[in-house]
Image (cartoon, grey):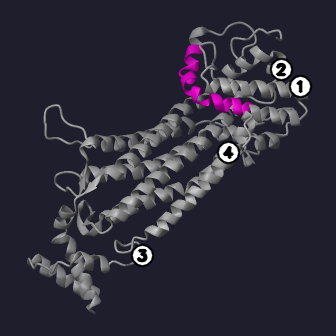
Amino acid sequence: MPKRSPQPATLWSQTGTPDALMMAYTIGDDRTWDTRLLSWDVLGSLGHIEGLRASGLLSARDHARLRAGLRQALAAVRAGRLLIGPGHEDAHSAVEDWLTRRLGTAGARVHAGRSRNDQVTVDLRLYLKDALLGLQGQVHDLSDALLAFAAEHQRILWPGYTHQRRAMPSSAGLWAAGLAEGLLTSAEALPALWARVDRSPLGSAAGYGVPLPLKREVAMRALGFSALDQVVTVVQNSRGKVEAAVLAWCVDLAHDLSRLASDVILLSSEEFGFLVLPADLATGSSIMPQKRNPDLFELTRARAAAVEGDLAAMLYLKGKLTGGYHRDFQLLKEPLFRGLDRTREMLAMMAHALPRVGVDQAKGLAALKGDALVTDEVMRRVEAGVPFRVAYRAVAEEFKQGVIFTTPSVADLIRRRRGTGNLGNIGLPSLRARARAGRRWNRGERTRFDRAMSRLGGRRR
């Protein structure tokens, strides 16, 4: 067993012990948030030592010992044996302390050529790659559920609304398919965001590089990144930018989820009744025994608003800083992790709940009579050769006088709406094809990412 070298109170202290109150204030709740980064910190270090070895900064013996030690550390994290303790500032100090206690001098070499500034950026980008792929998979799960709902209920009509007033005929299928396409469009935006996350910052150190012959591309390839953040100063200037872009994508998803939730709340109310909320997905009242409340949908709407708050906090934190590293960046973790958690929870709940929501066909049809069919009468006359504006004015006058127009059959309402994307031609096959293409991209990136992580961790794939 190698002789243990004395450990400083922090990774940055040289002599003495820092003020305890100052340490508590500056660490804050970083230990709690950094627990999520422990395994990624170890994997980042495994990639880093590949770069050190290729650059001639590690002997073959020390490289082998560090690789074995870090793989043991990874196993210890996964088993819950390597934790961030009260004597550690963060994930980085916990891992380095664990390593040097076991490897002595070899462990003390692991930090050569890097700072905690590029180290935490690597950790976050690995974490984000894993999280984003998971979220996109959840988006596809929910869009699949919506497309299945649309296929089952595409001939069940109800009014569409503008200004919260009856407008024209719509259908349960058209409603669900539109929400599905909105989610697919958001999911298809991920590759552009991915290109920003899939870049290695290692070798930038505290933001100005290091006077060592680092082969940055070696660590980049070992960690499965497709590119470098090339100019070393861009890395710290990107702090908060990448995280804000991630949360902006989450907000885009959250808006779709909030709209879905709000529609279910409204359309399942007694005044509408087009949708039916099952009893086991509703809550009751402590005083009114008849109540069936859509709490899960209301809390989805609230969580969507909270994700907007997470993004706002991120933007305020990063928005007024000069170039280079600032300790302010530490507080970016909380809104990032919370925003991702909320988005993950909303997607899971909506995918769970939606297939169990019922549809009342009779109430939808009953609501179609009258106002919602006036435009159909205009278009019937246009099709018969009457100029649109003439037909429009004539029907408006007749409606004002109380004329009751003939109610078309369901089949006729659908037949007359065969344009692409209309309720008689929703185009579910093309939407399913988009979903399949999105899943293929996701599987490809997941395979590439998981293979890189497995190679580093010693599990070949």
Badge 1 amino acid = Arg
Earlier residue among tags 1 and 2: 1
Tell me, yes or no, whether the two marked residues, 3 and 2, touch with CB atoms within 8 Å.
no
Q: Where, quadrant-wise, is the C terminus in this rendering?
A: top right
Give the side of residue 335 with respect to residue 303, left or right. Answer: right
Q: Which residue is mark 3?
A: 420
Residue at the image position 41 percent from the left and 53 percent from the top: 256
Disc number at residue 106? Answer: 2
Give the side of residue 336 with respect to residue 393, left or right. Answer: right
Badge 3 amino acid = Thr
Q: Separation of disc 1 and disc 3 at Cα? A: 66 Å
Q: Which residues are magenta?
A: 23-45
Q: Is residue 406 visible?
A: yes
Q: Secondary structure at mark 4?
A: helix
Q: Answer few, some or many: residues within 10 Å of disc 1's Cα (few below 14, many 20 plus, some between 14 and 19).
A: few
Earlier residue among tags 3 and 2: 2
Earlier residue among tags 1 and 3: 1
Disc number at residue 449? Answer: 4
Q: Secondary structure at mark 3?
A: loop
Badge 2 amino acid = Ala
Badge 4 amino acid = Phe
Position above or below: 273 against 96: below
Point out residue 104 in the picture as x, y percentages from the top left corner: 81, 15
Residue at the image position 72 percent from the left and 37 percent from the top: 459
Earlier residue among tags 1 and 4: 1
Q: Answer few, some or many: residues within 10 Å of disc 4's Cα (few below 14, many 20 plus, some between 14 and 19).
A: some
